[in-house]
Every structure is written in C-alpha cells, then in structure tokens.
Image (cartoon, rainbow, N blue to C red):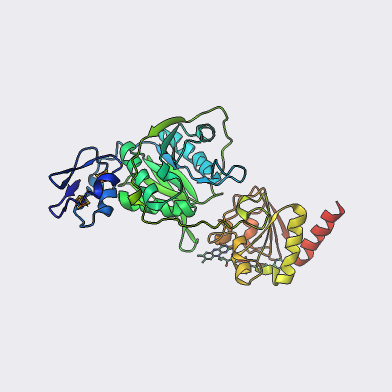
Amino acid sequence: MINVSPKCIGCNKCVPVCPFAAIQLIDKKAVINEACTLCGACVQICPVSAIEITREEASARDLSGYKGVWVFVELMESPDDAKRPRIKPVTFELLSVGRRLADELGEELSAVLLTDKNYGFEKELGAYGADKMYLAENPELYEYNTDIFATAIIALVNKHKPAAMLYGATIMGRDLAPRVASCLYTGLTADCTALAIKDGLLLQSRPAFGGNIMADILSPNSRPQMATVRPNVMKLAEPIYGKVAMTVREDIKIDKNLRRVKVLERHLTRDKGGVKIEDAKIIVSGGRGMKTKEKFKVLEELSRLLGGVVGASRAAVDLGLKDKSHQVGQSGATVSPKLYLSFGISGAVQHIVGMKSSDVIVAVNKDPNAPIFGVAKYGVVGDAHEIAPKLIEALKKK
Ligand code: FAD
Ligand code: SF4
Ligand code: SF4
C-alpha cells in the first residue's frame, strides 16, 4: 500500500519520476492512483519523506500470480562495432540454465533488456532459449546507472510478476540485483553455483563458510526469487538458431532526476593484448608448489607454446608469483576452458569451485592424495619442476 501523508508540501518532485504516470498534483498535494506499481521511485525523491509504502507480511501474500523465469540481459561494448553493443556471454549462460528451470516449471523464459535503442537481439536471445524479450527502450538507458536501471526493472517486475529472476554476478549485476531486491523486499542469493527447481521453488545453491559447505537456499515467501550467477559457472546450451524471442515493448517513463550518480568521464583500460583468463580456452595454472617467481616462469613458456593463458592459485598470488588478475577460484575468476593444466596446486575447495567446469583437467602434484586429483581427468604424481620442462621440450620438438 502507498500513502501520501499530510507532510506533502506539493513540490511536484515526485510527479515526473513516476514511470507509470501514477501521481498527480491535486490542490497542491500529491495523489497516487491505481496505476502505481509500488516501484518506490517517488519515495526516494520526496524531500520531506511524505510518501510511505507499507508491504504486506510476506506469508500473507498471494504469490500464485508470479510466473515465469526472467534473465537480465547485460550489454557490453563490442570490439568490432563501437555503435552496436553486444550481449555479455554470461547472459547466454543464464538463459541456458533458465530454460531448464522454466521447462521444469512449465512456464516461460524471458529476457529483460534495458537499452537506449533496439539493436535487434531477439534472434540471439531466442537461440539460447528465451521465449520473450521484454524491451524497455529509452534514451536514459544509454549506459548503466543503478537508480535508473533498478527503477525500470522494479516497474517491469511489478507489472509482469515473474517467479524468478537471474542476473550475472558481474560488476553490473552485483550492483543492480541487491538494489532491486531491497526495493522489492525480496531475497537474493549471490554467486550461485547451481540452480534447480524443488517443490515449485527455485533451489539456489552456493558455497558458504569460506567454501567449506554448500548452502541450499529457498525463498518461499517472496517474489521474484532472485539469484546472481558468476560467469563461466553454468554450462552454455547449444544455440537453436531460427528460434526468435517474441519482442514485448515496454514504454517506461524514466526521469533523469532519478540519476543520483553521473558519469563525468570514462577511462577504458585495455589488456595489453592477450585473452582474459575468463575467456581462455587453455589455462596453465600454478600453485604454491611452483615455489618462486623464477620457477613459475616455466609455466609462462608452456602456456605460450600451447596458446593459453597463465592461471594461479590464491597461495601463488599471495606469494607474489603471479598477480591477482590471474587468480582462479572463489575469490578470483571462474573459468571453464577446454584444457586446464594445474601444477603444484593442492585443490582446495575454494580453487576447485573456480575451475571444475573445465572440459579436461590435468593435474601435476607430488602428493598422490592431493584433492585436485578428485576433479582431474588425467593426474600425474610427480615433480612439477621436472614435468613442465619435459612438456615444453616435447612441444618444441613437435
Ligand atoms: P597449497 O594448498 O599449499 O598446495 C600446494 C601443493 O603443491 C600441494 O598439494 C603440494 O603437494 C604441491 N607441491 C609442492 N611442491 C610440488 C612440486 N615440486 N611438484 C608438484 N607438486 C608440488 N584459493 C584459490 O586458489 N583461489 C581462490 O579464489 C581462493 N579463494 C579463497 C576464499 C576464501 C574465503 C578462503 C578462506 C580461501 C580461498 N582460497 C582460494 C585459498 C584456498 O583455501 C587454498 O589455501 C589455496 O587454494 C591453496 O593454494 P595452493 O594449492 O597453491 O597451495
Ligand atoms: Fe509511481 Fe512508483 Fe511512486 Fe507508485 S511507487 S507512485 S509507481 S513512482
Ligand atoms: Fe509531496 Fe513529496 Fe511529492 Fe513533493 S515529492 S509533491 S512533498 S509527495
């Protein structure tokens, strides 16, 4: 329920920010009509806190009207075309898992796209399983802004009532999803590593207590059930080209005054060539067993010969053998290359969660009981400092 208290001074600030034109100023007082979706945008802009939203007790709410799985579509700059962004790969991973969840529920999978222009993404989104593409097109959506994007998402959620919504655990998703969750008074499970349906609810699994146990989380009393998932965690489905998501245009009015943060300048730092570890097809990773920076260099050479990227355990990063941008694991990057070669890494659970979805894992460790062998397809019990140079020699001969 929304209520305007007598504190209202008729300043008119709330009227333009309402995405649904639900507020009118009558006799110098704000009056809110039934078009209100309880998005909360007016609450934050009122200078005298005259607008109050009271939410029903979670358990008293009828949640049966919430249907379908939504995926937030994240866009990124395209290296080939500065005028047309492209869809971040994590979106396709979310659609892949979202398709499975929607099928289990017998409901629709929808992609939610907030953008300044329609770039015609319905074919790509459809190929990865989206039945619908909710398209909010507005010049104010030209770049990510927490307030603007959250208001738009909240408005769409209140209008269409999805049962579940997934976001990439990216810089954008990690900022947006909590804001949306707190405004909607719903839960959010961050960094899920597995998603399933249990008794009609979204079962959200994620590592807890430093990765030592897996927590299974259900949100029976709130909607949408929301989760973020890190890139490279969910397996990408084979695209079905030819399937097109049905475009549902959403006319959302967005007032630029909602934007509390303005981007004044942008400085893009590009990697000095080379592939980012998250995108690498081959990773040669080293751990504490590599001992010194000098000895670690053998892995750089091996990686170069294989056309891969060097990775590292957190212990190796802490020892200064490699910098943090190469760290694989729970507090580093999640990777899923075709080939993951590990040298002198024990296989702590916090490392494993970041690389276990690699296609083929080869581990070299001198301890036959090292946990890394539990996830490796091929294991070599031996000294990394002998085996890595031998591999280099063999590759050079080839
Ligand atoms: P160790 O566990 O010390 O293992 C070294 C291995 O090298 C041993 O198995 C040893 O047998 C082997 N070895 C030694 N010499 C040789 C040799 N000559 N040849 C072959 N093998 C040899 N860790 C991560 O990696 N990534 C993360 O993102 C991460 N996040 C974390 C987050 C939290 C909240 C916490 C609590 C921990 C995190 N950790 C992370 C740390 C993790 O628990 C381990 O401490 C770390 O992964 C150990 O790194 P390691 O395997 O290189 O070192
Ligand atoms: Fe408009 Fe949102 Fe305020 Fe309702 S809560 S009146 S929809 S701005
Ligand atoms: Fe009244 Fe607040 Fe709206 Fe101003 S912003 S008109 S004070 S409710």
- Of residue 178 and residue 12, the one placed in the foreground of this image is 12
- Of residue 127 and residue 391, the one placed in the foreground of this image is 127
| Residue drawn at x 46%, y 38% as measured from the top left | 117
Which quadrant would residue 162 be assigned to in this image? Answer: top left
Across the whole image, how many numbered discs are drawn on residues? 0
Can residue 107 be seen from the camera position used here? Answer: no
| Residue drawn at x 31%, y 48% as measured from the top left | 184
Q: Position of residue 194 (x, y in %)?
A: 49, 48
Q: Position of residue 359 (x, y in %)?
A: 65, 47
- Of residue 276 and residue 12, the one placed in the foreground of this image is 12
Q: Position of residue 226 (x, y in %)?
A: 39, 47
Please state, as top left, top right, bottom left or bottom right, where the N terminus lies in the image: top left
Q: Is residue 211 above or below residue 68?
A: below
Can residue 95 be seen from the camera position used here? Answer: yes
Q: Position of residue 201 (x, y in %)?
A: 38, 43
Q: Is residue 341 left or right of residue 94?
A: right
Q: Is residue 48 left or right of residue 292?
A: left
